[in-house]
Image: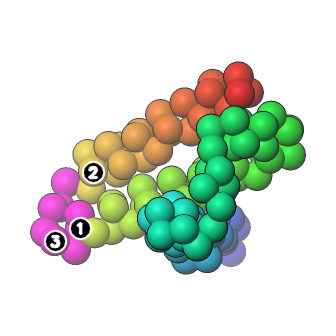
Amino acid sequence: MARSHKPIVWGLFAAGGTLSAFVLPVLILLTCFAVPLGLAPADLLAYERVLGLLGHPAAKLAVFGVLFLVIWHAAHRMRITAHDVGIRADTLVAALCYGIAAIATVAMLIVLPGL
């Protein structure tokens, strides 16, 4: 029987979905509710503080890892959603979704080291 690379792809997809489910709600809670309502310190998300955090290589790697997995998960989810709503040009949709994800990944690789 031929070996498949699907478990690797599905593992990355699942990791992106898991991070989306656990990390993004916390970020929304902090940025949309906790800081504006005064439940967290006003300087929690200050530019200098966040920039200082992203100055550490481990933080850059963590941010890249989370965003990489979430972006590629979203790209695959958009491809499947397009198919579900009746857009059957799968090759074009896949190229568009994954192309945007690839551009975002390259942009992160360019921007994050400069921080």
Judging depth in this view, the residue of 29 and 15 nearest the camera is 29
Amino acid type shown at disc 1: His
Image location (x, y in percent) of residue 26: 58, 72
Please say whether residue 110 is one of the residues in the magenta stretch: no
Judging depth in this view, the residue of 35 and 87 nearest the camera is 35
The N terminus lies in which quarter of the figure? bottom right
Residue labelled with disc 3:
85
In 3D space, how far apart are the residues under numbered discs 2 and 3 (Cα atoms)?
12 Å
Magenta segment's dominant SS is loop
Q: Which mark is residue 93?
A: 2
Residue labelled with disc 1:
83
Labels 1 and 3 touching (C-beta < 8 A): yes
Amino acid type shown at disc 3: Val
Labels 2 and 1 touching (C-beta < 8 A): yes
Q: Is residue 71 left or right of residue 23?
A: left
Q: Is residue 88 left or right of residue 55?
A: left
Q: Check disc 3 and report its element: helix, strand or loop.
A: loop
Image location (x, y in percent) of residue 28: 49, 67
Residue 2 is at least partly visible in this image: no
Sequence order check, earlier mark of 2 and 3: 3
| Residue ID at (32%, 43%) | 96
* Quadrant of residue 49 within the rendered picture: top right
Sequence order check, earlier mark of 2 and 1: 1
Image location (x, y in percent) of residue 90: 26, 56
**Crowd around label 2: few <14 · some 14–19 · many ≥20 (10 Å):** some
Residue 3 is at least partly visible in this image: yes
